[in-house]
Image (cartoon, rainbow, N blue to C red):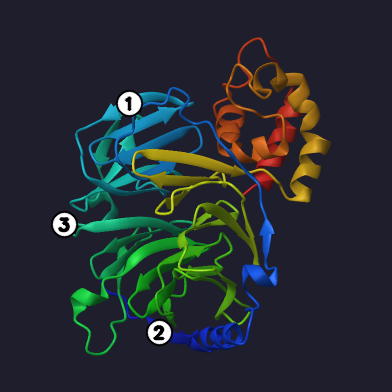
């Protein structure tokens, strides 16, 4: 089903021209030399302590406790940091994500293979082709993304398919004049806050899933896009980062020293990017970068519900967490959860503790919040037997979890 949609056009040429003029006159206002880049600290997250071989990593998706790594010749499934399955039935994986399940479940890990079929991780052990369950038919899918509650988008050739659990609506992309359809294939479908965005040769297109309107943004050399949970749009070229302003236009927020930008992803409440060998975080319009992260200059980034960022490069897959939490986050943890940790968790979850998961800080709890929700509040398998958790403590954890994204 094709959708008649309202289309709008927004040009960011004025922002680009202004930046070029200012840079030509000296130090640009959005450059490192102008002092716009702050400092952010990250820590590696130990998620594969046995150093299991992964193959040539193409994609990764997780729900907190469960992590699925998709490679050229296999998919490896981890639970509680241990390998629980290696599936070689499907090969040539190209993408993965955590989306709303076709059965109404809140979270399904899905992978997409080179033939464009969508597979669901079933029972943490095998993969089931669910393309038909999403109403995708025989069309080849390249990527998938959650746009908002109940909305899942799929990139199919030259169209974007939007599934809402009842029907699939397809949206064509804007093709510049005198450009063959084969040259207009969209890429980089991302979602968040009820919106979906994808890259086209002329820039970006933004779909409002509820209003069924599409807005086009002219941005030469656009390579990546990201949508924050509130629906704010971010875009990246090899040399610059942009963010939607109060008028809905893309405004320049950072100019790199060269063509060094190679990753952009919204992960939980954080928007991460890669700049050369460093990682960066965007908070609103403020940009901060690491010092000494040493990521590969061709690394690709992937999101995690925890807010961490996955960094993929060949057979290497690393996970990083931000280590300087927002002041409010630390204050809430100190007031309501530090005592709970001391009573019920510290025996196993201190730094270098026997569990392998450090929950001694607000950062640790935030990084593992999906796992905490599942193990402590839903399945109630934590704390283990012999480590009692008072009901009042569980209520405090539930209140903290409800306040987290």
Task: Name which of mark 1 and mark 2 comes first in the sequence.
Answer: 2
Q: Quadrant of the N terminus?
A: bottom left
User: Residue 365, image x and y in percent?
Assistant: 66, 36
Q: Are marks 1 and 2 in contact (CB under 8 Å)?
A: no
Q: Nearer the viewer, mark 1 or mark 2?
A: 1
User: Residue 332, image x and y in percent?
Assistant: 78, 42
| Few, some or many residues within 10 Å of mark 1 (<14, 14–19, 20+) | some
Q: CA distance from mark 1 to mark 3?
A: 28 Å
Q: CA distance from mark 1 to mark 2?
A: 46 Å
Looking at the image, which residue is at 60% across and 22% down?
382
Q: Is 74 drawn above or below residue 269 in the view shown?
A: above
Give the residue at the far right of this rendering.
335
Q: Which residue is mark 1?
A: 85
| Few, some or many residues within 10 Å of mark 2 (<14, 14–19, 20+) | some
Task: Name which of mark 2 and mark 3 comes first in the sequence.
Answer: 2
Q: Which residue is mark 3?
A: 138
Picture quadrant where residue 145 is located: bottom left
SS for tag 1? strand
SS for tag 3? loop
Q: Is 389 drawn above or below residue 65 in the view shown?
A: above
**How many numbered marks have been drawn onto this rendered protein structure?**
3
Give me the disc on residue 7: 2
SS for tag 2? strand
């Amino acid at each position: 089903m094709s959708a008649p949609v309202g289309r709008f056009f927004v040009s960011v040429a004025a922002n680009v021209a202004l930046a070029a003029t200012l840079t030509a006159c000296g130090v640009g206002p959005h450059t490192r030399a102008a002092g716009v880049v702050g400092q952010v600290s990250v820590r590696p997250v130990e998620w594969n302590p046995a150093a299991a071989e992964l193959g040539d990593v193409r994609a990764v998706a997780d729900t907190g406790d469960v992590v699925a790594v998709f490679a050229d010749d296999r998919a490896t499934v981890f639970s509680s940091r241990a390998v629980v399955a290696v599936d070689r039935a499907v090969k040539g994986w190209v993408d993965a994500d955590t989306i709303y399940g076709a059965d109404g479940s809140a979270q399904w890990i899905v992978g997409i293979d080179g033939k464009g079929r969508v597979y669901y991780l079933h029972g943490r052990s095998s993969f089931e082709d669910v393309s038909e369950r999403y109403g995708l038919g025989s069309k080849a899918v390249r990527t998938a993304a959650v746009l908002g509650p109940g909305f899942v988008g799929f990139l199919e050739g030259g169209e974007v398919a939007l599934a809402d659990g009842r029907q699939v609506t397809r949206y064509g992309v804007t093709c510049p004049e005198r450009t063959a359809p084969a040259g207009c294939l969209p890429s980089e479908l991302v979602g968040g806050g009820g919106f979906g965005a994808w890259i086209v040769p002329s820039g970006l297109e933004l779909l409002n899933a509820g209003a069924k309107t599409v807005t086009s943004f002219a941005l030469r050399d656009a390579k990546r896009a990201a949508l924050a949970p509130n629906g704010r749009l971010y875009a990246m070229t090899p040399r610059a980062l942009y963010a939607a302003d109060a008028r809905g236009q893309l405004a320049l927020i950072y100019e790199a020293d060269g063509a060094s930008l190679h990753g952009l992803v919204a992960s939980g409440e954080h928007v991460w990017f890669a700049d050369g060998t460093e990682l960066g975080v965007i908070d609103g319009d403020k940009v901060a970068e690491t010092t000494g992260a040493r990521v590969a200059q061709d690394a690709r980034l992937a999101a995690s519900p925890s807010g961490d960022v996955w960094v993929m490069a060949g057979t290497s897959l690393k996970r990083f967490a931000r280590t300087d939490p927002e002041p409010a986050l630390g204050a809430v943890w100190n007031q309501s959860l530090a005592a709970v940790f001391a009573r019920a968790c510290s025996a196993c979850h201190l730094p270098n503790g026997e569990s392998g998961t450090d929950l001694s800080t607000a950062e640790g709890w935030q990084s593992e919040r999906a796992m905490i929700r599942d193990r402590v509040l839903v399945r109630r398998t934590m704390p283990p037997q012999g480590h009692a958790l008072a009901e009042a403590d569980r209520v405090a954890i539930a209140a903290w979890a409800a306040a987290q994204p």
